[in-house]
Image (cartoon, rainbow, N blue to C red):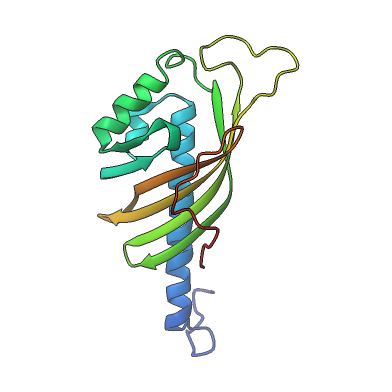
Amino acid sequence: MEKNEIMTDENQLSSEEIKKLRNLIDTEEIKKLRLKYSYHMDARELDDLMDVFADGAVCGYGPYGDWEGKETIYNNYKETFKDTINTPFVSMHVNTNHLVEITGPDTAKGRVYLLDVITKNMDGSDIEEGKSNFLWFALYDEEYIKIDGEWKVKRMDLHFFWPERHIADDFSTKFVL
């Protein structure tokens, strides 16, 4: 809008458009949060990784169990990555097809595809020539909460589809937008 242009009813945003803009901004902030999660995990920056979680967060990781609370999440990641903690990007979490639904002023849910690839074996050794470097194909179901204006992960459930299937009993293909 030009500096001297006067707002008219024709170029004013309706309350519905303002709500849509707020939802778009929140959706983008949630998507950025998700990308931070994967980046900090892959970079093995566990302290920064904990910043994406709300206090009391729960991570349901199928064969890895349910991790409750930031301290447990931190310690379990540290144990999981003990052989590669000093080798960033041994695994790379490629996130795609991120659906986000804003469910309230401070709540949302999301569903994200995960293509988890490795650049080395999880023990730090080189991948054998000709062996697949795909570790997992999976799907995250997440709940988010806005705390003091900042989105955090409240709950994260990971459903594994390949090479092994570990899917929660209550898993549904329905994701309503």
Q: How many numbered marks, from 0 up?
A: 0
Does the image show residue 52? no
Instruction: Residue 132 in the image: state x and y as whole percent.
Output: 69, 23
50 is higher (above) or lower (below) than 121: below
Of 127 and 160, nearer the camera is 160
Residue at 46% across, 45% down: 34
Residue for point 51% across, 81% down: 5
Horizontal relation, residue 149 to residue 19: left or right: left
Horizontal side of 157 relative to 129 (left or right) equals: left
Q: Residue extending furthest top?
A: 125
* Residue at the limit of the structure toward the front, as seen here: 169
Q: Residue at x 37, y 34 (%)?
A: 65
In this rendering, position of residue 135 left or right of residue 69: right
For the residue pair 64 and 148, the one nearer the viewer reads as 64
Q: Position of residue 63 (x, y in %)?
A: 44, 32
The x and y percentages for residue 48 are 35, 32
In the rendered view, tell whether residue 41 sits above or below residue 78. Answer: below
Image coords of residue 151 (percent x, y): 35, 52
Question: Residue 61's quadrant in the figure?
Answer: top left
Q: Residue furthest bottom?
A: 9
Q: Nearest the camera: 161 or 141?
A: 161
The reply to whether residue 159 is visible in this rendering is yes
The residue at 52%/17% (across/down) is 122
